[in-house]
Image: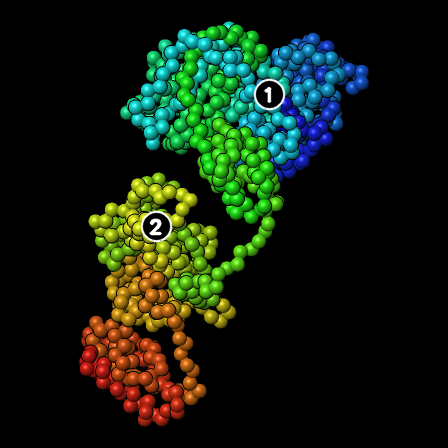
Amino acid sequence: MRVPLSWLREYVEVAADATPEDVLASFVSVGFEEEDIHRFEISGPVVVGRVLELTPEPQKNGKTINWCQVDVGEANGGVRGIVCGAHNFTVGDKVVVTLPGSVLPGPFPIAARKTYGHVSDGMIASARELGLGDEHDGIIVLSTLGLDPEVGTDAIELLHLDDVAVEINVTPDRGYAFSLRGVAREYSHATGAAFRDPAERDFSELQPGSGFSISVDDRNPIRGNVGAREFVARVVRDVDPSRPTPPWMIARLGLAGMRSLGVLIDITNYVMLELGNPIHGYDLDRLQGGIVVRRAQEGERMTTLDGHDRALHVEDLLITDGSGPIGLAGVMGGGTTEMSSTTRNVLIEAATFDPVTIARTARRHKLPSEASKRFERGVDPLIPFVAARRVADLMVELAGGTLTEEGGALFTKVEIAGIDLPRGFTQGVVGVDYSDDEIVGALEMIGAEVTANDGGWFVIPPSWRPDLTDKWTLVEEVARIHGLDRIPSVLPTPPSGRGYTVLQQGRKRVADALAAAGFVETPAFPFTTEEQNDLHGSATGEHLPSIRLANALDGQVPFLRRSLIPGLLQIAHRNISRGLVDLAVFETGVVFAPEAGVTYGTDFIPPLGQRPSDETLAHLNASIPPQPRHLAVLLTGNITPRQPGRSAEHVEVSDALDAVRVIGVAAGVDIDVAQTQRAALHPGRAGVLSVRGEDVGYVGELHPQVSADADLPGRVMVLELDLDRVLTLAGERVVAASLSTFPAATQDVSLVVDAGVPASEVRAALIEGAGELLESATLVDDYRGEGVGEGRKSLSFALRFRASDRTLTAAEATEAKLAGVAVTAERFGAGIRD
């Protein structure tokens, strides 16, 4: 909200020497955030001049310029010669002259300069050059603004260009602060300055009259709330829309962030900013009959003021007349009844609408407006009568209209629920020993009615504060009014025995280990397509149930992920497109794995302000799909870059297997790998990961077609596993293996088996048979070809033996090796290669 200080001073006493920074500090003290300070960024000398002579001079480029003699007053150098390209003025007109030394918004310094064969000693200014609007086709002729000042008068002061506005951030729960009325009251709270409420008027002055039909026909209210609770209409006749908007109003609207659009529209915008109630004006002569407020019908359409033809939704609240829709209530009016340069009679509308209805309509049509911003936060239900009369008075004063007795209104009794505030509750929540007088004083200062009772106080919030709904919100007001600086800063003492859970510790160890191994953690958005879920979420690419978002951020990826791989593919594509082609990235995050045939979701919303029961939590947990935490890794490009004397090494499946080993060590488990097939992986280069016989994930090279579809050049290695399941299988304690001080005995063995036997199963049998003396078994070669027979392969393993209590002999190591070979022979028919 931008607050012009001259406007603020009309409703609250602001010290004459108060700077904008002082005003912002006062707002900050009552809970607002400061944003900026806005000025017209113009400095003098900028004065009023009278055109004495005007000589048109055609130029070779086809343009015609005017060589003018302009009287700017004796104090400013008398008559000055000025070149001007505009043609909307004549001799005798009074204009705004920016003399050499002045600076216009931009910044644009003015100096005497030679142009078109003359020395132009200044510039005659347009509205846009002064920062007053977008008009640039002609210069400002002061008579068109209703001004006839003396020659030489300071034009900055005359046009109110010396005003300044402060901008504060208004949180969604404090919609009343989107008005000068609201922020002036808050400034009064901060400083104790006297406040004058612009809404205080005798109700007898506010009666709208009669004779104009108004009705509400809401047959489908949202949450049982009728779309319009109050609707006030007044008629002003014989307005003159050609009259100029006064400079003071143009300046204030500009500082508040609005441009001048003509006196009639400017008045409605001005009152909206002043009182916080959006106003709409209709060309009365274009209306057909009375006004009916209703919901849209199926298939109905209308054209709004911005020229867009809009398909309406049955929840949209409409303003209609005999011709059909003439406005989206609380959001934007229609083009058929808008006020224009031909308007002579105006119907003024001031209303209060259901906030939920307005918010949904504005978002549905992607049509945020100053009106919807206020209505969806809640407008004071007692203000529409005041706002309608204020607009009518200004149209009479500034547009020459006549206020009639015509009009109409819908009345609804305003009932505000009271709140019990127990004595001592405020002190217990805030931690400040407020006195009873301080509590009552703060609540009465914000406009609440406070009545003492046996247990404390009964508080009726003011009509303009719909955010005050319970005792906690009242406590916040007491703390805010008396200063947040009074609240002590005390760090809470954490209870003993708390910290990371076992799973959290495990996740942190795994992530730290991968980062230490050179991988980069890259979180991705959890949104994808149904096709990607099917491809990467299952081994065969079969269709799987997925969760579709009701209001997706991106309509092209409306499903929650079942796998982390699609997100890593997007990250890889983005990095490669920016020249980062060697990647080793990983992500830990939840995936969403709904079960087939189960319906998820619930309409039950537990009450706020109290801890849900165990039954409630169980119900809510049952309404969401399983969300295990997965870990995924992606590698592509070179694992080792090209160096002097060494060629680059491309990533291989072995590098992904190294990542599996890093994860297993950090998690405290042995992760076994066996060959498998997956739809998304290269045939023959895919492995299933298992822990203690239970499948927990997969590893391998991405299928070339999948890589191509993701726009990834070269080979891509991936792995994904259920990290929560891995850590659960690891148990709560990770025990480090003891280190033997005795030397190791190393031997090799090459076993010939059928080509279809997985190497991992041969290794497992070898380890089982060798017993406790075998410390490690590493596959070092897989040979197929001459010497081993058709359909056979030779698997070579490097074996390391070690005892914890002695130095092994070669015979002991050989005996253990042969025991392992015997098990492989029994299971797979393996024989030692000659």
Q: CA gap, disc 2 to disc 1?
A: 58 Å
The amino acid on which the numbered mark 1 sits, given as a three-letter code, is Ile
Place of residue 494 in the rendered image (x, y in percent of width and height, measured from the top left): 50, 59
- Near mark 1 (Cα within 10 A), the count class, few <14, some 14-19 or many ≥20, is many
* Element type at mark 1: helix
Of 463 and 646, nearer the camera is: 463
Choose between 135 and 610: the one closer to the eye.
Answer: 610
In front of the other: 157 or 131? 157
Which residue shows up at 53% across the image and 59% down it? 493
- Residue that mark 2 sits on: 613
CA neighbours of label 2 inside 10 A, class few (<14), some (14 to 19), many (20+): few
Which residue is at a point 32% across and 59% down the rendered structure image? 702
| Label 2: element kind | loop
Q: Is residue 174 above or below residue 606?
A: above
- The residue labelled by disc 1 is 250
Answer left or right for 73 relative to 762. right
Q: Is residue 377 above or below residue 266?
A: below
Q: Position of residue 70 (x, y in %)?
A: 73, 14
Q: Amino acid at mark 2?
A: Ser
Rendering quarter of residue 485: top right
Extreme-front residue of the structure: 454
- The picture places residue 400, in percent across and down from the top left corner, at 56, 8
Residue at 59 percent of width and 41 percent of height: 435
Which quadrant, please, contains the N terminus? top right
**Quadrant including the C terminus:** bottom left
Relative height, residue 18 to residue 242 (above, below): below
Could you tell whether 412 is left or right of 102 in the image?
left
Question: Colour scheme in the image?
Answer: rainbow
Q: Is residue 226 visible?
A: yes
- Can residue 519 be spotted in the picture? no
The residue shown at (40%, 15%) is: 336
The dot on residue 90 is none
